[in-house]
Image (cartoon, rainbow, N blue to C red):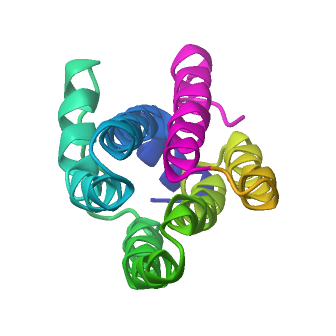
Amino acid sequence: MRSIADAQRDMREAYYGGATGAVTSATAWLVAAFVATFVNPTAGMWTLIFGGMLIFPVSVLLSKLVGRSGRHSEANPLAPLAMEGTVWMLISIPLAVGAAFYRVEWFFPAMMLVIAGRYLTFATLYGMRIYWAFGATLALAVIPLLTFEAPAAAGAFAGAGIEYLYGIAIFTTFNPGTSK
């Protein structure tokens, strides 16, 4: 790669600007929301955690279905940032689980904060400013959930809705040669 812009373009092209991951993640959140509603909040929590393990492989498959490689160049200097962001997210999940031991309703808002931080790094990874708004929207959505003591499923539905909103926005505005 000759420049960061080239590396970002490679990431955008391989993963459809991250849209496939956002939509896949949104689906995991939505399934967790339904489980939290119709089974119980704790089952919804574990659904999101286990569903989260499927996000990357399913998003790669979805990337391939929309005509992308689902694989960045081995020489891409941003690959470590992607891995570091993943590791940071994984080691932050126990904080959300710990919050749930105190109040189960806090799990999904805590996860929204964890995921918000991950999306903020995607602004650099993909070279797309929309990820700043994405991360900020997730983080700010936590405020009313906690202020109004929303039920656990409300947090899961909020996470799903925000992820679908931004995932669809990225899908519809995606242009691999430019940043947004």
Closest to the observer, 153 or 175: 153
| The C terminus lies in quadrant | top right
Q: Residue at x 66, y 50 (%)?
A: 150
Residue range in magenta is 151-180
User: Viewer-proximal residue, 119 or 71?
Assistant: 119
Residue in the image at 46% along x and 33% along y: 19
Rendered residue at 68%/51% (across/down): 138
* Residue 122 image point, x, y percent: 57, 56
Is 152 colored magenta in this rendering?
A: yes
> Is 44 included in the stretch rendered in magenta?
no
Q: Position of residue 34 (x, y in %)?
A: 35, 35
Find residue 132 and report its horizontal and vertical position in percent.
Answer: 74, 51
Report the front residue among 65 and 49.
Answer: 49
Q: Quadrant of the N terminus?
A: bottom left
Image height of 61 relative to 156, above or below: above
Residue 8 in picture, x, y percent from top left: 54, 50
Q: Is residue 19 above or below residue 71?
A: above
Q: Quadrant of residue 98?
A: bottom left
- Magenta residues: mostly which secondary structure? helix
- Compared with 22, 2 (above or below) is below
Farthest residue to the top: give it.
172
Q: Quadrant of residue 149?
A: bottom right
Front position in the image: 134 or 72: 134
How many circles with numbers are drawn on the protein? 0
